[in-house]
Image (cartoon, helix red, strand yellow):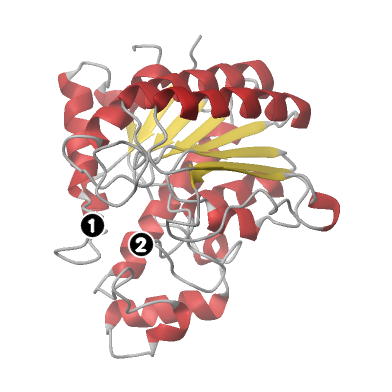
Amino acid sequence: MSGKAYLIYSDDYLSYRLAEDHPLNPQRYALTVELMKIAEVLKDDEIIPPRPATLKELYLVHDPAYVEAVMKLSKNPENVNGSRFGLGSEDNPVFFGMHEAAALVVGGSAKGAEMIYEGEADHVFNIAGGLHHALRDTASGFCIYNDLAVAIAKFREKGFKVAYVDLDAHHGDGVQWLFYSDPGVLTISIHETGRYLFPGTGSITELGEGAAYGTKINIPLEPYTEDDSWLWALEEIVPELIRKFDPDILVTQHGCDSHRFDPLTHLANTTLAFQESAKLLHDLAHEVCGGRWLAGGGGGYDYWRVVPRAWTIVWAEMTGRS
């Protein structure tokens, strides 16, 4: 089963270049689109360019003072002391044009959300999206703004219940904390245990607060977990939770740094895990959410061997061309 699907992409995404030697290499986006075309799973009329996020959209999840600091540093890295905002570190270096580059990624996911709730699309994949570590007033883990959190906030403004599933090897902390007290957002993160990997959070005791208690779920896994165990954990937990929560929208993050070749993590998946998880989530989107499914990319630091293959697999499943 498939639906009307679109890929959010523009070569302007290549401007999200934190530093020349930074592990997050935006060339992975261009390589992914190139592979999709070579594999004949992507048509030109399915590519939708992103637009910059508005300040109003950024303020849905980010402190205006933080956004202002990013904008000032974007023009002149000496303008503001960025350290109080998590900027200027090795993970999150300041670079010229960073506000514009990050706002474009957010705008891509915001546009995808609009296409879905306006009925223009069933499925949307923003391959540069999935920047899940950014917090309300802090950059974190290569993430300046939290694009999927903005998209979720837009869905919530329309009254939709949202289920968010994060497949990245790193805990989806930013999205979890931004909606920690919102009972209308279910977050599920399957990741390498924070005992060994950034950001150090994502334990099974992080369950939400107030009326949202029980809507924040974490599945921490030991290093060297392979496909069979990773998929077993996903299949045993995710479908039942989503069916019981009964969301209107499914939002997913497809970080592929759980692959055994990834240089920053310690999980041991192959591309089989990405294929099977995409199929499971696709089926759930149709079964529970009327097909409404917004997906983002995320982590993945073997940028030429793993990332293009992983995200081409996700897109092929999304379009029924796998």
Residue named by callout 1: 23
Horizontal and vertical percent position of residue 126: 39, 40
Quarter of the image with the C terminus is: top left
Using the rendered view, name the quadrant where residue 39 is placed.
top left
Query: Is 44 situated above or below 125?
Result: above
Q: Nearer the viewer, residue 94 or 189?
A: 189
Q: Residue at x 47, y 59 (%)?
A: 133
Horizontal and vertical percent position of residue 87: 37, 77
- Element under disc 2: loop
Q: Are marks 1 and 2 in contact (CB under 8 Å)?
A: yes
Q: Amino acid at mark 2?
A: Phe
For the residues labelled 1 and 2, the Cα–Cα distance comes to 9 Å
Q: Is residue 265 left or right of residue 212?
A: left
Query: Is 126 situated above or below 74?
Result: above
Query: Is 273 situated above or below 151?
Result: above
Q: Residue at x 52, y 63 (%)?
A: 58
Residue named by callout 2: 142
Looking at the image, tell me whether mark 1 or mark 2 is earlier in sequence order: 1
